[in-house]
Amino acid sequence: MGIFGEIRKEVSGSVYSDNVLNFKLPDSYIPSVYTLLFNSKYYFEFIDRLARGSVQQRLNQETLKELSIPIIDYKKQQQIAKLIEESFALKKQSEHLLEVAKRAVEIAIEESEAIALAYLHTHTANDDVY
């Protein structure tokens, strides 16, 4: 409970659980920036205080209205959003490189070090792979 996520275009239109609250931010709010903010320790503690229910803690539309949402300067949001997007790209790149490294080790064991090095070169030389 209390974990926020952004619905990106890749999953837009998907079906989600009825235990998930969905709300739309105003156009001047960049979703990735506010997702990061809402998932901070401060908001986890705040949401924990807002939660209702004795057996299963939950938020509802009424308690969600009590959530304070600061107005962050739009230029600052753009800077933060750029860093967030860079972090996603770097995560994707690191996952790719890990898979390439694992496969290269397999190739080195099964075939030869020279073939593994050639594989590494061809699968890490192209920056647009990520």
Image (cartoon, helix red, strand yellow):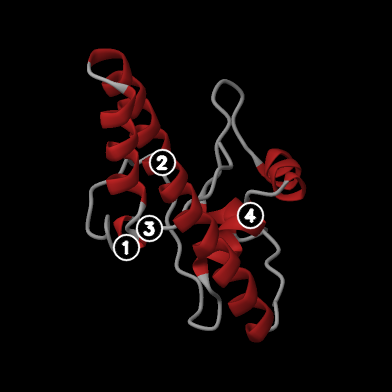
Q: CA distance from mark 3 to mark 1?
A: 25 Å
Looking at the image, tell me whether mark 4 or mark 1 is earlier in sequence order: 4
Read off the residue under disc 1.
128
Looking at the image, tell me whether mark 4 or mark 3 is earlier in sequence order: 3
Give the amino acid type for the residue marked by disc 2 in the picture.
Leu
Q: Quadrant of residue 66?
A: bottom right
**Residue ID at (52%, 63%):** 86
Nearer the observer, 21 or 93: 93
Read off the residue under disc 4.
38
Q: Quadrant of residue 116?
A: top left
**Picture layout, residue 40 above or below residue 75:** above
Looking at the image, tell me whether mark 2 or mark 1 is earlier in sequence order: 2
Q: CA distance from mark 4 to mark 3?
A: 14 Å
Looking at the image, tell me whether mark 2 or mark 4 is earlier in sequence order: 4
Read off the residue under disc 2.
97
Q: CA distance from mark 4 to mark 1?
A: 32 Å
Query: Where does the image place residue 65, in percent across and percent down from the top left?
Result: 60, 61
Read off the residue under disc 3.
7
Q: Answer left or right for 19 relative to 30.
A: left
Give the amino acid type for the residue marked by disc 3 in the picture.
Ile
Give the amino acid type for the residue marked by disc 1 in the picture.
Asp
Quick one: SS at disc 3? loop
Residue depth check, mark 2 versus mark 4: number of the one nearer the observer = 2
User: Circles 2 and 1: CB distance less than 8 Å?
Assistant: no
**Residue ID at (23%, 52%):** 14
Looking at the image, tell me whether mark 3 or mark 1 is earlier in sequence order: 3
**Picture layout, residue 100 above or below residue 128:** above
